[in-house]
């Protein structure tokens, strides 16, 4: 029993942190936020998938990918293509010159559905595509680069270029992808209205459970032998290689896993927000995902979620009232985190958290009452201070 | 490519080639600065595009000041604005190194994040000072127009001027890096920081001036940029990825590689643009680069440095 416990939650602290996060997103937010705000939080939590993937890849693996937006985008677009096909049934699109194809294709004088759109008529295929396509894509990129021992800075730049290529491609091929506006007007999933409040609430909870599941899976990876190797590779890659491990394969695996997680986030994004556009694929969103992870703490899976929430709350609040200040603040945050708090919020908690937990020490004493006599002695001493 | 005769194709290549030369000049000036900062110092300067914009805005500022107060000076202001752009961007770079970069030399990936933050702040400053709209300086008359070489081929004068500026700068950078005693110190610091320090080179000072020089050249790129397009707050970000590709493709530590790759990238993009849409030209160029880099990760001209 304790074996499973340690594998999934790390240690006691990890368990407590996980429970607090679960309580916050599953109980506190749904109770205190209206449907609109809850949907907004749900949108933020989809970015958290990418942030968590970056904790694995960058914090533990030491390989910074500036292309998580690619995988977020592929996942989101796969889901959007399925929903769009359903929304453009021949009855719904009877006024078009070619009924039965998505509206933007009709505007671009396409007369039949392109080949690669065909399989997205099937929901099962779409789910598989969301998981498999980004993984294969990541495998190709990863195998090509890690096998040749390209890493670090070069990897970051090349992933960034790939995200630029994908964005330019999506924007340029308007007839096939919906162009700069993206794929919009998504209404139903297998005949079920996804724009209603009840559907949005349901998606919120599915999203939360998926996110918590991803965190547990990631923790499982990190506490395994593979997790140790990952850290070892980050700190002294050559030594791991000389010990007889194939470093490239480990890196490829973690890159593929990170890609898959981000794609799940992308698919959930489309379901909750109701559209997908190239503005979630390019350089800016990809770097923002890195900053979510950095602010939350690049070594903390749970911190990444808090980092995502905090930055996005801040962004929404500030861009509503002081849009000019937001970029200054965001830029300042970037610099401050890198220079002064390299371990982000989680690092701050490690360093200063005990000051706060001390304040709540009475709770601990309350629960521990009668168990150990010495706690009350401690309490008296603290009271005397 | 059907439908074009050989003469026409020749003219198309020549015209697009001249258009590509302007792009080549700006890319090369940007990349020279970045090659010094990234190739020699290992700092990923994501704000490099914003230093270019600083130069472009300086040119714009000097142009409008000259126009209002000393109109007679108009034909000559551009030469001064190039120098001013170099100085302004260089001083900004000097400050950035002092405040930010020097704390991060041991963490190259973190310089990426910090300079991205810097670029956000600089972009917003431009937006607050100069407005969100794109601006362009009034160019002096002698920079406008084109020289008709044959019936079908026009040579744009601004392109030639910018090319001249680029060649001059490149030669100057080569002289600085490979002939002057300062360049010797820079190269020594790059190759072995500890050893360079041990023989009495002030490596911190070398770093600071190298970074400032790189940013200053980006500022000159900005001045050159104003002759071919207008400047907005986000102009820098449009060029930063291309510039990084130029440096990486050329081989990060090789200045000669930077020139070769800037030329081939700019020409490929410019000539492809005529036959397929601009966005697809960009996709093809970048994709080809990525694929080549996957087979030859060290770039075209890798310097054989023992690591």
Image (cartoon, coloured by chain):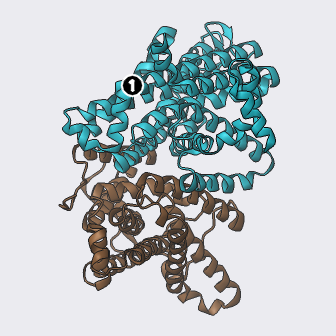
Chain colours: A cyan, B brown
Element under disc 1:
helix
- Dot 1 falls on which chain? A
Q: Nearer the viewer, residue A256 or B169?
A: A256
Quarter of the picture holding the C terminus of chain A: top right
* Position of residue A168 in the picture relative to residue A285 (left or right): left
The x and y percentages for residue A319 are 74, 46
Q: Is residue A113 visible?
A: no
Residue corresponding to mark 1? A135
Q: Give the camera-side residue of B216 and B99.
A: B99
Horizontal arrangement in the rendering, residue A233 relative to residue B103 (left or right)? left
Q: In x, y percent, where is residue A41?
A: 70, 29
Is B283 placed left or right of A83 in the picture? left
Residue at 61%, 45% in the rendered image: A348
Name the residue: 50% across, 55% down.
B238
| Quarter-of-image position of residue A238 | top left
Residue under the point 59% across and 35% down: A303
Question: Of B237 and A314, which appears nearest the observer?
Answer: A314
> Which of the 4 image quarters holds residue B158?
bottom left
One can see residue A23 in this view: yes
Is B66 in front, or is A344? A344
Taking the spot 60% from the left edge, 11% from the top edge, the residue there is: A89
């Amino acid at each position: 029993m304790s074996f499973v416990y340690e594998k999934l939650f790390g240690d006691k602290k990890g368990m407590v942190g996980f429970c607090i996060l679960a309580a916050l997103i599953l109980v506190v937010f749904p109770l205190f936020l209206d449907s609109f705000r809850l949907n907004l939080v749900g949108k933020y939590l989809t970015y958290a998938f990418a942030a968590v993937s970056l904790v694995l890849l960058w914090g533990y693996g030491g390989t910074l990918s500036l292309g998580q937006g690619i995988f977020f985008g592929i996942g989101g677009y796969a889901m959007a293509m399925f929903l769009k096909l359903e929304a453009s049934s021949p009855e719904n699109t009877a006024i078009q010159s070619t009924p039965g194809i998505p509206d933007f294709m009709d505007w671009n004088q396409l007369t039949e559905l392109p080949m690669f759109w065909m399989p997205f008529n099937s929901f099962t295929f779409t789910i598989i595509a969301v998981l498999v396509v980004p993984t294969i894509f990541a495998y190709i990129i990863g195998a090509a680069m890690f096998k040749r021992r390209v890493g670090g800075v070069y990897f970051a730049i090349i992933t960034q270029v790939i995200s630029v290529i994908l964005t330019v491609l999506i924007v340029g091929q308007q007839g096939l992808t919906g162009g700069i506006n993206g794929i919009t007007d998504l209404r139903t999933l297998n005949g079920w209205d996804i724009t209603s409040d009840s559907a949005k609430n349901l998606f919120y909870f599915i999203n939360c459970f998926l996110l918590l599941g991803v965190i547990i899976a990631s923790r499982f990876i990190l506490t395994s032998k593979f997790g140790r190797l990952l850290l070892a590779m980050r700190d002294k890659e050559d030594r791991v290689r000389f010990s007889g491990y194939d470093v490239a394969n480990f890196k490829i695996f973690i890159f593929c896993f990170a890609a898959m997680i981000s794609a799940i986030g992308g698919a959930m994004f489309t379901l909750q927000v109701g559209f997908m556009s190239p503005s979630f694929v390019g350089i800016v969103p990809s770097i923002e995902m890195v900053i979510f992870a950095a602010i939350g703490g690049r070594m903390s899976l749970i911190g990444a979620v808090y980092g995502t929430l905090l930055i996005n709350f801040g962004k929404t609040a500030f861009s509503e009232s002081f849009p000019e200040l937001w970029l200054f603040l965001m830029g300042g945050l970037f610099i401050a985190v890198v220079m002064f708090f390299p371990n982000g919020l989680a690092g701050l908690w490690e360093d200063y958290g005990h000051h706060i937990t001390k304040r709540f020490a009475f709770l601990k004493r309350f629960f521990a009452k009668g168990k150990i006599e010495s706690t009350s002695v401690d309490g008296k001493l603290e009271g005397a201070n | 490519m059907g439908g074009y005769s050989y003469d026409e194709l020749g003219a198309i290549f020549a015209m697009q080639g001249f258009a590509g030369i302007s792009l080549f000049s700006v890319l090369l000036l940007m990349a020279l600065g970045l090659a010094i900062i990234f190739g020699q110092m290992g700092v990923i300067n994501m704000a490099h595009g914003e230093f270019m914009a600083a130069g472009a805005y300086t040119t714009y500022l000097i142009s409008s000041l000259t126009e209002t107060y000393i109109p007679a000076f108009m034909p000559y202001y551009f030469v001064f604005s190039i120098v001013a752009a170099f100085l302004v961007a260089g001083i900004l770079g000097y400050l950035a190194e002092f405040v930010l970069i020097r704390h991060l030399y041991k963490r190259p990936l973190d310089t990426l994040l910090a300079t991205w933050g810097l670029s956000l702040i600089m972009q917003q400053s431009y937006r607050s000072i100069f407005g969100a709209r794109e601006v362009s300086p009034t160019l002096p008359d002698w920079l406008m127009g084109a020289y008709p070489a044959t019936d079908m081929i026009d040579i744009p004068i601004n392109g030639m001027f910018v090319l001249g500026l680029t060649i001059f700068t490149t030669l100057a950078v080569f002289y600085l890096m490979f002939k002057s005693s300062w360049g010797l110190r820079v190269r020594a610091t790059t190759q072995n920081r500890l050893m360079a320090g041990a023989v009495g080179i002030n490596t911190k000072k070398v770093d600071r001036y190298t970074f400032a020089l790189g940013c200053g050249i980006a500022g000159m790129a900005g001045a050159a940029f104003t002759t071919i397009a207008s400047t907005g707050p986000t102009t820098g970000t449009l060029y930063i990825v291309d510039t990084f590709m130029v440096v990486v493709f050329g081989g990060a530590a090789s200045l000669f590689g930077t020139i070769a790759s800037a030329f081939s990238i700019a020409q490929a993009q410019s000539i492809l643009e005529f036959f397929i849409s601009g966005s697809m030209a960009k996709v093809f160029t970048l994709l080809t680069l990525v694929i080549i880099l996957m087979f030859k990760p060290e770039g075209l001209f890798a310097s054989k440095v023992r690591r």
